[in-house]
Image (cartoon, rainbow, N blue to C red):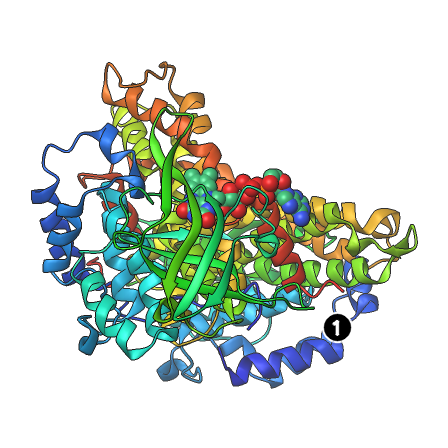
Amino acid sequence: MTLTAFPPPPPGADYDDLRQEVRAFLAEELAGFPPEKRAESWNGFSRAFSRKLAQRGWVGMTFPREYGGHARSALERYVVSEELLAAGAPVISHWIADRQSGPLILAKGTEEQKRAIVPRIAAGELCFCIGMSEPDSGSDLAATRTVATEVEGGFRVNGTKVWTTYAHVADYMILFCRTGKSDDRHGGMSQFLIDLKATENIQISPIIDLGGEHHFNQVIFDDTFLPSDALLGEKGEGWSQVMSELAFERSGPERFLSSFALIEELIRVLRQDATEAQQAEIGRLSAHLMVLRQMSRSVAGMLNEGKNPALQAAIVKDLGALYEQDIPRLARSLVSRPAVPGGRDSYAAVLAYTELAVPSFSLRGGTREILRGIIARGLGLR
Amino acid sequence: MESMIHDMAERLFRDHIGHGLREGAAAGQCPEALWTRIEEAGLPMALVPEEAGGFGVPAAEALGLVRIAGAHGLPLPLAETLIANAVLARAGLTLPGGRLTIAEGAALRLDRRGAAIHASGPLTLVPFARWADRIVTIAALDGVDHVLSLPVKDLTVTPAQDLAGMPRDDAGVDLALTDADAAPLPRSLGGMRGLGALARSLATAGAMETILSMTVEYANDRVQFGRPIGKFQAIQHYLATMAGETAASRAAAEMAADSYDTPAFALTVAAAKSRSGEAAETVGALAHQVHGAIGYTQEHALHHFTKRIWSWRDEFGTELDWTRELGRAALSSPRDTFWHFITDSTAQGIPA
Ligand SMILES: Cc1cc2nc3c(=O)[nH]c(=O)nc-3n(C[C@H](O)[C@H](O)[C@H](O)COP(=O)(O)OP(=O)(O)OC[C@H]3O[C@@H](n4cnc5c(N)ncnc54)[C@H](O)[C@@H]3O)c2cc1C
């Protein structure tokens, strides 16, 4: 696979009937949902919405039927994902589980884990969070200090995770931590499936973000006991398991549609009469979006064929973050209206929300600098 | 994509195009022997439907030849001949063989004079005109698009060139055409501007892939401060940026190629040409930055590729032309939301 080749998605990837069904559903469910809520993009939380979506068969779409899934293709899932994001639907409650935790459990979990968890993910009932980052381990994930020590009947965990998005409401965490010593920097790591509602000695406290909102948390493990069957996958194989999640985590439409509500507002404002210069900027914005979407759908096509396009995914995420971060600047260069948090009108409110959201886009899910290092190595730099 | 014609073209170009041949062409020598091989391989007919003498490969695959030619810096009008043949075939005109080129015919004036059609006016910056046997163009007669096949020997050709030294000639037309050389175009293929833009985006993507691999190789080989410069993070990030822009250009061009001869083409080609044109800026600049002074010499091969991608930006519509067109379409779309415009713009099955 050449790194710069993104073959077009296969013919028929439009799934237009499915798209129209999703649009009709969203038109009804989100009627009256205001633009400033839509601006939260995939950070919006609603268990009720996730469950309704699941009732339509649109959560766990790619999971096998025997685990409550719908055995649909990655490209069909893609259609649903992008329609949800474009509409600004509140999806985070099921998003992480649907995108990466579910597929991880299906790939590496025991039969019991699969039967116990996956059908509930597909029902839209479970919210997952990811416990990777720590105070001294951000980009350098291998510097993880949190440790799980083997004891009678299971493990005892000690350590601190930070930036754990929605840990305060989540049902499960997939924890990445150390389980042994190894000469290899990437060795001795494992993943655990933690039932947050049923496990004692886990202290979850809010970290308020710069917008004044509570999305992420600090999670402290204090001699927390986990039963043996909480181990997810092979002991000591945590690193390679995490790496195999990345193509799912980094290539989706959420990597370039996070500012989409502002784009819709901008177009609405300019629609009446745009100068030639404004038209050209909107054209440029359209061209970039069409191309990112093509690349992201191409990766979905590769995933569907069972390939591991982790490098292509890194490219999509790097270009996607540049794009979605640039939208407030672009809007400000075309329309002279101040950002007002909470807003006088929807444009002002959405601009304010998005301005405060964009700095995180090139941090979460792997920073720009780390992605570029990965891409450079993929190019064959020695 | 596994493709026999791609493999064949790769081999042919790899074996027969080198720095010397590109230098010679930039100095004005048409590489005739190479053209003969290209014709013998049948490549100029790849985009023509089977019933008109083509060999029945999908259009996107045939168009892939243009990317491969771009990757090798082919100094001949293969892309132009492919397109000219496809347009002639669509209009039911004979395929004359030989080297053909294409031009936008908006400045031509057509009048009926008896049984003949009289064509007059200027064609500007026509690719490889002085090396071509015919220029194929499209112009309107009584509001109907007509395909014209103009013998270069009957035109007044004034030589000029692009940044890479490739012929881009002006041609004055003042000619009576019989219906052997002029015919209405029954169903548009996207106009010469669109088709030319498609070819240039594909070639740009190919040339960028070559620029990228040359630059990676150089970063691995060039040692400063006791280590290959590719070990420096600043250089690594430049290369990663080049890779992203290259990948985006190729995806964009292939998106347009994939919608060749469908209603989606009008917008996908606008996206492709403007996106690859924008990327040419970044990729060219960073490639030269990594190569240092040696890359700024005539002796080094890099300039043949960077000058081509810079030139191609200006042909068949600049970024400004295409983004305006796309922006106008987006802002005047009858669809409820911008999102619907975006999904429709690339939809494979949208009605004409
Ligand atoms: C909104 C948001 C949600 C998040 N949600 C979660 C979550 O749910 N679960 C979770 O585990 N984590 C989460 N994270 C954390 C995220 O994964 C980290 O922020 C990220 O990995 C970077 O780590 P850091 O913040 O410690 O920065 P650092 O790693 O300290 O980096 C600081 C700066 O140094 C640069 N840098 C670091 N190393 C290098 C290097 N080798 N070369 C060049 N530059 C370098 C970085 O690119 C960055 O610019 C979230 C973060 C955000 C912003």
Q: Is residue A6 visible?
A: no
Tell me if A108 is positioned left or right of A44 in this view.
right
Instruction: Report which residue position mark 1 lands on.
Output: B17
Which quarter shows the C terminus of chain B?
Answer: bottom left
- Measuring from the top left, give residue B238's x and y in whole percent: 69, 48
Which of the four quarters of the rendered structure image does ligand 1 lie in? Answer: top right
Residue A218 position by quadrant: top left
Three-letter residue code for mark 1: Ile
A2 versus A249 height, above or below = below
Tell me if B261 is positioned left or right of A221 in this view.
left
Tell me if B170 is positioned left or right of A120 in this view.
right
- Measuring from the top left, give residue A148's x and y in whole percent: 49, 61
Tell me if A359 is positioned left or right of B349 in this view.
right
Give the structural element (helix, strand or loop) at label 1.
loop
A116 versus B228 height, above or below = below
Q: Residue at x 25, y 48 (%)?
A: A93
Query: In the rendered structure, the residue with mark 1 lies on which chain?
Result: B
B231 versus A240 height, above or below = above
Q: Is residue A64 visible?
A: yes
Mark 1, residues whose alpha carbon is within 10 Å: few (<14), some, or many (≥20)? some
Task: Give A66 or A22, whichever is nearer the viewer.
Answer: A66
- Measuring from the top left, give residue A274's x and y in whole percent: 33, 24
Q: Residue at x 75, y 73 (%)?
A: B17
Task: Give A260 or A10, whichever is nearer the viewer.
Answer: A260
Q: Residue at x 24, y 22 (%)?
A: A346
- Measuring from the top left, give residue B234's x and y in whole percent: 73, 45
**Mark 1 CB within 8 Å of ligand 1:** no
| Number of marks in picture | 1
Q: Residue at x 19, y 41 (%)?
A: B335
Task: Give A7 or B159, whichever is nearer the viewer.
Answer: A7
Task: Give B266 or B151, whichever is nearer the viewer.
Answer: B266
